[in-house]
């Protein structure tokens, strides 16, 4: 065990916090992830800044809330102005590499405006959010996209113009036809790809290859799985490892459908919610979702063993988390954009090799963590400047190494911009009228909706969020207090992005030094 | 009279709204500006977004609040990401030129990060906030700065290494010594520069030259005077045109010094406030301040006559305004950063040559105007896209051309970041703890101060803002309502800057078109 020199930032896509055995799932077994939690600290109250891939990931990579980085939904490019972990680590000589998904979209208009040429090294970095793309693979990518996975499949005998559609998310039908994983009703069938050639297997090996290559040189690796995100189809044997009786019970009731919030009602009319509201949907999809998680765990077991053999567990900080959860039918919803716990609460485990963290190993810390804490924790662990004028998260090192809890945060925040979704059309709204902001404290969860009534849940009395108190007069004082928290949070957004605090300190009340003598009598 | 083809955006520096004869000043005469008001519309309730040059100007140039553009104080560069009027007009083939001051600081770190080379044309535009600098002159500039004014002075016989310090802001003392305009006690003395060689004269001629050169080609010219900003020293005869009895009475009382707000108290300890609190300061400075305004008016008279001769009054939209006011001893303050009317309310006259505006000529419109309205008014007048995903102001065209008043704004907003000021040191605060935000409605002005009690003024009962009700329990409900307005305003900031609304519209619920079939049963 020793000082942190490398960082392994493992992310799953759409993995719920409650789908790990160490988090209490009664039937799903995740021994490798559990073992990591035993070596590190598990944070069961970790929240993402958005229940959508793109904005959530941009918060992870920038250390800033969605309101600050501005990439409010999947199709919104991150502004070139925003700095990511690559900006912070590369100048220190640390390679910042990606194996898997980031969902970074190039800010094409910015590149053109700044005259950054398409073929330059700078353009490549800028287009990738400052990650060096070992293998960029966002999943459900068209043939010919950047990843080497399609070529890999071809090499291994999966002959097709679109091997992903024909093998990875396809199953054999009873009459020799191919059945697509895009249809959730096929989720229980085995994929036509062999397990060792699946996305999860491929990307884990990419990560191991990079770590091998790096030897003793410092690195930050973002290993970013596209699973257990849809399409829900697993290769054998994972497709059949679980059954309906192994699944967590659905968290939904008829009562939720009375007096629905208008935006929630619109989301429930979207196809994914209609499909997941079928009586048979959850039992069909969840076992495969669990199989895909179990597969990730098996590969992480191999990866962690590999790190141990190399001695890298002695100097590598490891994060394990997800970009958001998945309703899987809970609350009569599919997908993840609403502000329920199933979407916003994610697995979060940190392994810190430093001996200073020995006292917390294997512990569970119930303090609030946010996705934006990954960047500041990384900077602190590597001894790099905190860049507090930009970074809005907090370093977890004091928690990992036995710090003071009294000044820790009392609330977490998340946002939604539903302007790209059908819900906007259902509600007849314009693209800039689709904002929502959430604040969650120990007891309350409050959601402000632009032009609609708020939502409020009492998590002490109603931890399953079955009773929306947003329109209940009895709770007006709670809503007011939560609105005050939102307002204070907004006022604190870091918008002075061009200069840091040291710059300000060095230039405070120094006008006379610069030959400016205003106010002198 | 005809359609708008050109825009003349005239700005004074530190000119109070009440220092024009058309605004009711009883002794100061500003006939040229008054004549413009007669041809156009005067808006007596126009507010800047910050009482400091830099942030206020960046709001004028971007059409965005300070919270959005992030250049929170004079020494904070505008992020390269922010678009200015130049970005909007140059692609339409309109030259966007500057004669005078902008206070734009280059975002040096951004230029380096984006690899924009120092000598390139793009770099020059980016360093200048997308203005083409005919003559960039920010005032109190060191010798050798970009302006041609120093060379001009040398040509005209003002021989010195620093002709500005030795002639423009210097007066002859009784014993042959030079007395500096930096000392306010010298304000009544005539400057050693001849009037026709002064800053105001020089810059007006630069503007006329540009307009001549352009002929019938379209242009946007920012004529930006550095006066009547300090140093307060006027060339003859303007130094002696007014006396103490011509000045507006001081707006201050002993009562204001009881139970002072902590930040206000700190500002009153700064040198400019101490100096302006002297009994003789206002009577010494204000007559010269008035003389400098009168001089601008005389030159504007020549400029407007020139435009008329050229026929340019038929196709040129003209704005006349200022970046903020000047306390000149009111409220026991110098300078302008606090949120009183003397600082935030500015002259605002718009002349629209379009016949559609004939009905409003010579009228006074008391609806609220903000500095951020200049960009959208310009875009609307020229028939260019509104860029509503970025621009936060509103076009004034409906007001100029007889539009609906019922949906107009009910409040104006301003901000302060006092981290660069001595007040921060007096209060013992850190650079990111110095924020304030103001909202003003018809009746109330409310200021939120980070970590201090708010301020509140009842402008109906107390138009001179002599009684701060920020700590008075009786007004708790008003403060709550105003806090709600601030919060709603913050929630509306336009942070999704990389894509416009049309982009969103074209990509709403289109995933199936892109081969993504999530949620299908």
Image (cartoon, coloured by chain):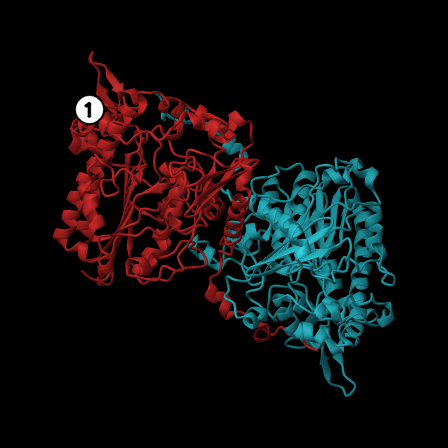
Chain colours: A cyan, B red
Dot 1 falls on which chain?
B
Helix, strand or loop under label 1: loop
Which residue is drawn at the image coordinates 68% and 75% (left, top)?
A274
Task: Name the foreground residue: B70 vs A7.
Answer: B70
Task: Name the foreground residue: B22 vs A384.
Answer: B22
Expressed as whole percent of the image width and height from the top left, the position of residue A169 reads 71, 74
Displayed quadrant of residue B197: top left
- Residue A254 appears in the picture as rendered: yes
Expressed as whole percent of the image width and height from the top left, the position of residue A475 reads 68, 54
- Residue A508 appears in the picture as rendered: no
Which residue is drawn at the image coordinates 27% and 23% (left, top)?
B284
Work out which quarter of the rendered image holds the C terminus of chain A and state it.
top left
Q: Is residue A153 above or below residue B479?
A: below
Question: Crowding near pointer 1: few (<14 within 10 Å), some, many (20+)?
Answer: many
Work out which quarter of the rendered image holds the N terminus of chain A and state it.
top right
Expressed as whole percent of the image width and height from the top left, the position of residue A97 reads 65, 52
Q: Is residue A125 left or right of residue B193?
A: right
Q: In the current view of this chain or complex, which residue is farthest to the left?
A: B309
Q: In the current view of this chain or complex, which residue is farthest to the top?
A: B175
Which residue is drawn at the image coordinates 68% and 72% (left, top)?
A273
The residue that mark 1 highlights is B192
- Report the label total: 1
Q: Is residue B35 left or right of residue A394?
A: left
Expressed as whole percent of the image width and height from the top left, the position of residue A429 reads 52, 67
Q: In the current view of this chain or complex, which residue is farthest to the bottom?
A: A175
């Amino acid at each position: 065990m020793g000082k942190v020199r490398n960082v392994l930032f493992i992310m799953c896509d759409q993995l719920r916090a409650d789908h790990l055995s160490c988090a209490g799932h009664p039937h799903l077994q995740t021994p490798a992830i559990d073992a990591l939690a035993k070596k590190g600290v598990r944070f069961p109250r970790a929240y993402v800044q958005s229940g959508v891939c793109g904005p959530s990931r941009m918060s992870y990579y920038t250390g800033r809330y969605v309101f600050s980085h501005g990439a409010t939904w999947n199709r919104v490019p991150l502004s070139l102005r925003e700095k990511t972990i690559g900006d912070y680590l590369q100048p220190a000589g640390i390679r910042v590499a990606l194996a898997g998904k980031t969902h970074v979209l190039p800010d094409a208009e910015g590149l053109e405006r700044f005259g950054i040429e398409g073929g330059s090294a700078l353009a490549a970095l800028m287009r990738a959010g400052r990650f060096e793309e070992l293998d960029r693979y966002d999943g459900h990518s068209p043939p010919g996209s950047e990843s080497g996975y399609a070529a890999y499949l071809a090499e291994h005998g999966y002959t097709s113009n679109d091997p992903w559609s024909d093998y990875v998310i396809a199953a054999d039908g009873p009459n020799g036809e191919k059945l697509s994983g895009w249809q959730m009703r096929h989720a229980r069938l085995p994929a036509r790809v062999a397990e060792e050639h699946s996305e999860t297997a491929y990307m884990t090996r990419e990560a191991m290859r990079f770590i091998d290559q790096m030897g003793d040189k410092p690195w930050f690796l973002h290993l970013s799985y596209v699973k257990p995100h849809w399409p829900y189809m697993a290769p054998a044997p994972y497709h059949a490892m679980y059954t309906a009786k192994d699944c967590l019970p659905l968290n939904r009731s008829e009562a939720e459908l009375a007096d629905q919030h208008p935006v929630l009602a619109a989301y429930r009319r979207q196809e994914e919610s209609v499909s997941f509201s079928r009586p048979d949907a959850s039992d069909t999809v969840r076992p495969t979702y669990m199989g895909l998680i179990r597969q990730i765990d098996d590969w992480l077991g191999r990866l962690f063993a590999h790190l141990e053999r190399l001695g890298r567990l002695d100097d590598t900080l490891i994060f394990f988390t997800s970009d958001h959860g998945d309703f899987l039918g809970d609350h009569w919803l599919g997908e993840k954009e609403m502000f329920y716990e199933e979407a916003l609460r994610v697995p979060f485990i940190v392994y810190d090799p430093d001996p200073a963290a020995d006292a917390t190993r294997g512990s569970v810390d119930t303090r609030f963590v946010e996705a934006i804490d990954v960047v500041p924790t990384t900077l602190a662990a590597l001894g790099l400047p905190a860049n507090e004028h930009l970074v809005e998260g907090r370093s977890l090192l004091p928690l990992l190494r036995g710090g003071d809890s009294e000044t820790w945060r009392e609330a977490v925040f998340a946002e939604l911009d539903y302007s790209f979704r059908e819900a906007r059309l259902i509600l007849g709204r314009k693209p800039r009228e689709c904002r929502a902001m959430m604040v969650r404290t120990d007891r309350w969860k409050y959601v402000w909706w632009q032009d609609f009534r708020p939502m409020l849940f009492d998590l002490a009395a109603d931890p399953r969020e079955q009773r929306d108190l947003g329109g209940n007069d009895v709770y007006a004082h709670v809503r007011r207090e939560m609105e005050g928290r939102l307002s204070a949070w907004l006022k604190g957004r870091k918008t002075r992005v061009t200069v840091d605090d040291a710059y300000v300190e060095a230039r405070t009340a120094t006008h006379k030094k610069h030959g400016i003598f205003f106010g002198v009598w």
